[in-house]
Amino acid sequence: MSIDNAPRLDGAGDVHQGPDQAFPNPAAPGGDAAPAPKSSRNKTPLWKLLLRDRMATVAAAILVFVFLVAVFGPWLVGDAATDQNLDRSNLAPFHVANGWMNILGTDPLGRSMLARLIVACRTTLLVALPAVALSCIVGSLIGMWAGYHRGWRETTAMRVADVIMSFPSLLMAVVVLYVFSPSAANIVLVLAITRIPIYLRTARAESAELQSRLFVDAARTFGARSGAVIRRHVFPILLPTLLTVATLDFCYVMLAESSLSFLGIGIQPPDISWGLMVSQGRTYLQTAWWLSFFPGLAIVVTTVSATVLAAWARIATDPAQRWRLTVPRSRRSRLFPTRKVVS
């Protein structure tokens, strides 16, 4: 070893390598730190990954705004949604002289469209969220139980799901609500029952695949009961998929409620929902287009935002796909270039 390449000690007692020994010393002052392991990329918080995706960030902001409006909006507008003033009937929107409460126009009875949209937002979400939550909980529990135990439990659960799915969900809701009174509770119950097979089949497939994994076999070997295995090992892995399905199903349920209200067998006056507002304004499309346009726009924006956020959440919660959100798009295009098809 030559003198130049031999390691030497400085005053602090740190060892410095020679020029031919390219081993960094992390402990030395000013030395280069060792690169972080690749596994740390998957430990990035979800909110940071969300901020890196512009479309998902905008979608999340819109959904948060909608939920805040549903919670606090009716308290802020007070009785403006029900106050009638025939002198202000069918006022056109975007006229500041009519007052900020009438910035989106008024209906034939002179009621504020802005206030009615805010109140209808709460009614629509109070139907969609309980229906999605009820169907998700019931379907997931039955699906995990049937998929884990297999046998006659799985067969029975799948046949019941097939029977429910054999009827068009919207048609079944129309028939049931026509026979019974079209109240909000009945709408939630009917929509929840028709959506249970979606979660049941998803949970059954995932649970049946996980019950043969090595870590599940190890838990059973050590004497863990089936309920504990499902709760501690199966459910945490299944949760991201269920949340993604629930987000997409929220769009369908909200559109189904709007369709039922549009047909006149959904939410009934004096309650108001976005679908009912579209139905009430269809006779004024040529003279007062805003009566149906703004509630329809609210439905479209909310459902599109939920769809975009669900697509992002599916990638963010999948360890095999999460790296796509950590790599810049320019670098991603270099790693996976688009292949050109030569004719």
Image: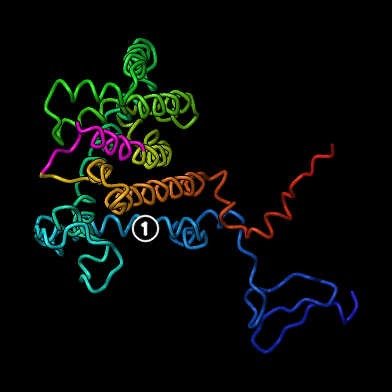
Nearer to me, 13 or 272? 272
Whether 138 is drawn above or below 78: the answer is: above
Residue hosting label 1: 62
Name the spot of residue 90 as percent of width and height, x first.
Answer: 21, 57
The chief SS type of the magenta part is helix
* Residue ID at (32%, 28%): 195
Outermost right residue: 2
Question: Within 10 angstroms of label 1, few (less than 14), some, or many (20 or more) residues?
Answer: some
Q: Is residue 49 left or right of residue 224?
A: right
Q: Is residue 292 above or below residue 194?
A: below
Q: In x, y percent, where is residue 206?
A: 44, 28
Q: Is residue 259 visible?
A: yes
- Going by the picture, which residue comes out furthest to the top? 152
Q: Residue furthest front?
A: 287
Does the magenta-highlighted stretch encompass residue 340? no
Task: Look at 31% across and 26% down and name the residue there.
Answer: 170
Query: As rendered, which of 18 and 231 lies closer to the eye?
Result: 231
Q: Is residue 217 visible?
A: no
Residue at point 39%, 16% (across, down): 150
The magenta stretch spans which residues?
252-269
Q: Could you tell me the amino acid type at mark 1?
A: Ile
Percent position of residue 304, x then y: 42, 48
Which quadrant of the structure image shows residue 178?
Answer: top left
Work out whether residue 327 or residue 121 is closer to the camera in this orientation and state it.
121
Q: Secondary structure at mark 1?
A: helix
310 sits to left or right of 180 = right
Q: Quadrant of the C terminus?
A: top right
Percent coordinates x, y for residue 215 in the rendering: 46, 32
**Number of marks in picture:** 1
